[in-house]
Amino acid sequence: MDSDKAMVIFQPSGRRGEVPRGITLIEASRLLGVDIEALCGEKKVCGKCVVRIEEGHFEKYGVTSGMQSVSPWQVEEEKYINAERRKKGFRLGCVATVQGDLLVFVPEESRAGKQVVSKAARDIHIDHNPAVKLYYVEVDSPTFEDPMADFERVCKALERDYGLSNLTVDIFTLRTLPTTLRDGNWKVTVSVWNEKEVIRIRPGKDANAYGLAIDVGTTTVAAYFCNLTNMAVVDTVSMMNPQCKYGEDVMARITFHMTSTDGLQRMSDDIIEGLNDLIDQAIANTYPPKKKKKKKKGEEGPDEFIEVPEEGKTYLRLTRDDIEDITIGFNTAMHHILLGLNPEFVGMAPFPPVIHHSMDIKARDLGIKINPSSYLFVLPNEAGFVGADNVGVLIAEEPYKHEENQLIIDIGTNGELVLGNRHKLISSSCATGPALEGAQLSFGMRAAPGAIERIEIDPQTKEVNYKVIGRDAWRKYSEPKEMKAKGICGSGILDVLAELYSSGVITKSGVFNKKALKDCTRFRINPDNKQPEFVLAWAEESSIDKDIVISQKDVRQIQLAKGALYAGCKLMVKRMGLEKVDKVKIAGAFGTHVDRTKALIMGLFPDCEIEMIQSVGNAAGDGCRAALLNVKKRVEANWCSRNVEYIELTVEPTFQQDFMEAMQLPHMKDEFPHLRGIVPDEILDQ
Amino acid sequence: MDSDKAMVIFQPSGRRGEVPRGITLIEASRLLGVDIEALCGEKKVCGKCVVRIEEGHFEKYGVTSGMQSVSPWQVEEEKYINAERRKKGFRLGCVATVQGDLLVFVPEESRAGKQVVSKAARDIHIDHNPAVKLYYVEVDSPTFEDPMADFERVCKALERDYGLSNLTVDIFTLRTLPTTLRDGNWKVTVSVWNEKEVIRIRPGKDANAYGLAIDVGTTTVAAYFCNLTNMAVVDTVSMMNPQCKYGEDVMARITFHMTSTDGLQRMSDDIIEGLNDLIDQAIANTYPPKKKKKKKKGEEGPDEFIEVPEEGKTYLRLTRDDIEDITIGFNTAMHHILLGLNPEFVGMAPFPPVIHHSMDIKARDLGIKINPSSYLFVLPNEAGFVGADNVGVLIAEEPYKHEENQLIIDIGTNGELVLGNRHKLISSSCATGPALEGAQLSFGMRAAPGAIERIEIDPQTKEVNYKVIGRDAWRKYSEPKEMKAKGICGSGILDVLAELYSSGVITKSGVFNKKALKDCTRFRINPDNKQPEFVLAWAEESSIDKDIVISQKDVRQIQLAKGALYAGCKLMVKRMGLEKVDKVKIAGAFGTHVDRTKALIMGLFPDCEIEMIQSVGNAAGDGCRAALLNVKKRVEANWCSRNVEYIELTVEPTFQQDFMEAMQLPHMKDEFPHLRGIVPDEILDQ
């Protein structure tokens, strides 16, 4: 073996291979295709990438032998790995480097699981006017008297039958034209983009074209696969943003770009490859599932697969070429990274993006594999921290068409806020951090199987009831063999703070109420870090063999996030000269899961009539879908991006004070009359 | 050695390598990068690819041994290789296949030489209005009060200073924007295409942009390298069309596409690669020549090169990115092949092209390596056999702006004819074949060094004087050490027919005048083919060690070509209801070389005042240059392509009769009053 290399095996995946000595275990995991959580972008501050060294370092050579297979223990690791776990061989993947052959175990809590993305399409009204429309024409064939060229012949028929004129044609489509015309016996279906350009020609008559509306979030990517002709949502597909391995939030990725030579290229390549996988997934779903054909006794040769269609189900059997349009929305940093635009200045005051306006880009210019002549419509950006995704939210929710004042909160790693009505709209962003999405908490995790997504705490007994993703029933009705808890995801985190508060476990200021908890076995002081903590699930209910707790520090993290959001909302309301808003809409990847009452209890935004709080789900994705199916929405999007006034909240003189006050539950001073009767008065009036 | 392969060595180039057994020597030569003439596209009808088997077949194994290194002699070869040459080992490269190891000698006459392309830019009037224009702007930098995006910031400055609005930007340019703006301290030069799209941004102030006007001929490719700002022609570069190896004329290449699985792709790839080489050449010429740095005694390491600038000369030192626009013209088949469009139907009645209209194609979509966001403007096609090159001729010569009737003859492998004035224009094409370009004649060759380009024959002595390319003086003043003759190229062929006729060597009907030649040693019957022939250059004056002759068959070939042209001209004049034309313009790759008097003597077109005959050189290229420097010419080109009426001449009832009569010199019946006093009456009145 090359002495500069070492063999590393990761368990339980079993992936193995030679890697250069001296790289970190996280780097090795990437080389070998193993997903380890690296929420902080390897800045050694999240502690999520804990792994256990199983062989090599310990059994073969011993710690003191000097022939170590991993680099020596570092002081930064102490914060995340206590003495007992250290003895068992636990190390931080971003700190320990490969020094020799290794067998590494990745514990379940460190694995980057496949997120369950619930981004079903809502039933919003969209006028039918897609950018790509189909026209069937019967073309005259050429003669000596009329030897006109193929393309002009098609144009003539399109003008005669549909009044279309001055069409151009993409070179990739033109290449298919002569054969297609003759194969179709001079009868063809023409796809025309924006009444300008011919982007596909098929022989014969075909009524269907398809498109994708893609919402690229910092963490998740979801796409609506739509029929452009009848507007049906054929399928919804989603995946993790493959850039997560470079850091959980926008700033971590910008930092990765700035501190590596090819960071932008790598991140861009990864998301493009991811989108191609997503497209593959959407296409594959249009075919029946396959199963391996049983071999006859003694039969040799490669495995064969046969289709097993579900009864009564018809399959579209599409190809990549059948996808003829894409619309795409994202925050400004994801926009820049995907398009290969330097995101550096988006991360530096005064945060100017590279471009506001929407763009029509040939999908092939980005390496996105659909119909070769098709375009990708990139929604416009509002500002450095309010991106095209927020424009998507706007064109889906259309606050500019109403008299009432709407406050729209799009909760992501960055909170994006819009407030206003038909007369005026302002937007802003606030750094909530990833706490509301489950990161940076002791047991925070993404919305993946095993994540606690709902919590109830009994005000009397302080007993906890919860529901995990992947298990239909709540804890008390579940059988042990079913999905066990592993951590808490975003919606569970909103629940937990509201429940801890309204059940009296924590006080208005977010401190554990020791008096009320004195007989509660769930409350304790952690022997390692001396932090107070509250047990949500006992080790025997968990799949990671540890008590799942929420610590005082976790509560503080959530308070910081919700405080930032509340302060932002309050300042915007003030800036608009309003007393209160008429309607609050909560959007976001987990928007559909939010319990609006609990969101009000924890004080995510100022008091409001509960009936006027609305979960609008993945409104950004709905906006992309609207732009896919109605080209006028694209014009509206550009109007939005330039007519929503961006407010930089952090420079407001009262911001710090407002933020501090808003960290309390639901708020230090502001009244919440609509919580009367829902939260006990003795709690509200603390 | 793999028994399916054999080692083949080509001399004198010395190129060698293993090739699959069973392929022809021409195919082997291509695999090994050796250029052998294959004018007929390997249809075994031109006899240009004669090679000599030096070893293997003969010396090692003997003809009768049965272990032959080449395939057996074929009957088709007898036509081109006589018994004596057969004994010496000569074979046709397109017939003989590799059966074992071989050493092959490629005689000079079979080598595809580098053509001398004389396509200097003429001084035609062009208004300055290029598609790509430069704008210098000083942009405000962003602040918290004005955090507008980089691109919108540039647009604002462009609108403020130049009134440009609604600009888009290519994604490749946008990627450079943030860094360029900051590198240039917010002062940048912006290249805008058609007042629509930003295609380049440079830091600071720069006044120069460059472009290429490319004329892709069937045989040669020439490009004018122009400064878009001051319209100067910086350089003229040219090369052979690398597709020549697939066949000399348009039909041979269409056939190659139809008879091979990837023929279109290969031909397209070859011409694109060729254009990139041409661009490299244009760029390289903007740097001083380099010479190898002398090493000190005992010094090791790789060779170093130093620049040796010519005194007083300034060098532009450009890069590929400095080329920001390209216009391109070609015949319809070359158009289709370069763009990857199926040329099959252009070769089949009623010959419809795939497209008439001009196209704006991103150069990168074709793999052409210039400024990454730049476009290529493809001139429009008139018809299947009258292509964008003829449109180029039209917009350069502008017959539609004059009252006088102009007849424009573009001589290429296909003759393209235009006739008309401001009221009406008609066009046609006639299959002249490649004879006028030097192919299919015993000693025909391209306009390369060693080609006879001018001939004079003394009417009394029948002595021949000639001038070859690469030698400044005529034969009688040249020293033997200078460039020797190798064959006859296009302009020499026009001369030779006129001189043979006006000196009385051949009669009006093109037959050798045996009576007049009875004492002339230059006239003889070829012992091999029993054909009468006339010696133009003796073996000792030639570089191929053979008498260079023009045979009776050669004369007939030229007559066929000129007859087709004349008949075409005559029918067009008739179709327009004219008695005679006011002006004749001769264009073509060798247009500038044509002696107008001799063109009239040989009867290339109907009688005309000699002063009204004009050589307009590479008018197609001039038209491309006009379209490069003046965007209005592009609109004019599209107007031309749809407003010139295409006439199919071969379907005219009198065509065959007209063609037959026109084969005589200058014509069987038509009068040539303007030749009186130039050609002796006794010759004219035969």
Image (cartoon, coloured by chain):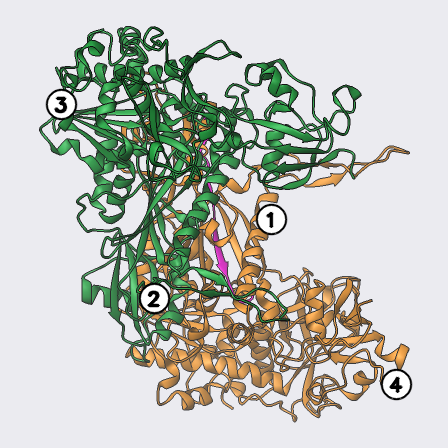
Chain colours: A green, B orange
Q: Which mark is residue A609?
A: 3
Residue under disc 3 on the same chain as residue under disc 2? yes
Q: Residue flagged by tag 4: what amino acid is it? A: Ser
Q: Secondary structure under badge 3?
A: loop
Q: Does the magenta stretch include residue B204?
A: yes
Q: Kindly report the distance in space between the C-alpha atoms of the residues bearing marks 2 and 4.
A: 59 Å
Residue drawn at point x = 17 percent, y = 20 percent = A678
What residue did someone put label 4 on? B65
Q: Residue flagged by tag 1: what amino acid is it? A: Gln
Residue A346: image location, x then y, percent: 40, 24
Nearer the camera: disc 3 or disc 2: 3
Nearer the camera: disc 1 or disc 4: 4
Chain to which the residue tagged by mark 4 belongs: B
Residue drawn at point x = 44 percent, y = 65 percent = A307
What residue did someone put label 2 on? A202
Nearer the camera: disc 3 or disc 1: 3
Quick one: which residue is furthest to the left in this view? A403
Q: Residue flagged by tag 3: what amino acid is it? A: Glu
Of residue B220 and residue A594, the one placed in the foreground of this image is: A594
Residue under disc 3 on the same chain as residue under disc 1? no
| Label 1 or label 4, whichever comes before in sequence order | 4
Q: Residues within 10 Å of mark 2 (few under 14, many from 20)?
A: some
Of residue B544 and residue B466, the one placed in the foreground of this image is: B544
Q: In which quarter of the image is the C terminus of chain A?
A: top left
Residue under disc 2 on the same chain as residue under disc 1? no
Task: Look at the numbered discs 3 and 2 and tell me whether their residues touch, using CB distance below 8 Å.
Answer: no
Q: Secondary structure under badge 1?
A: helix
Q: From this view, report whether residue A585 is shown above or below residue B196.
A: above
Of residue A412 and residue B202, the one placed in the foreground of this image is: A412
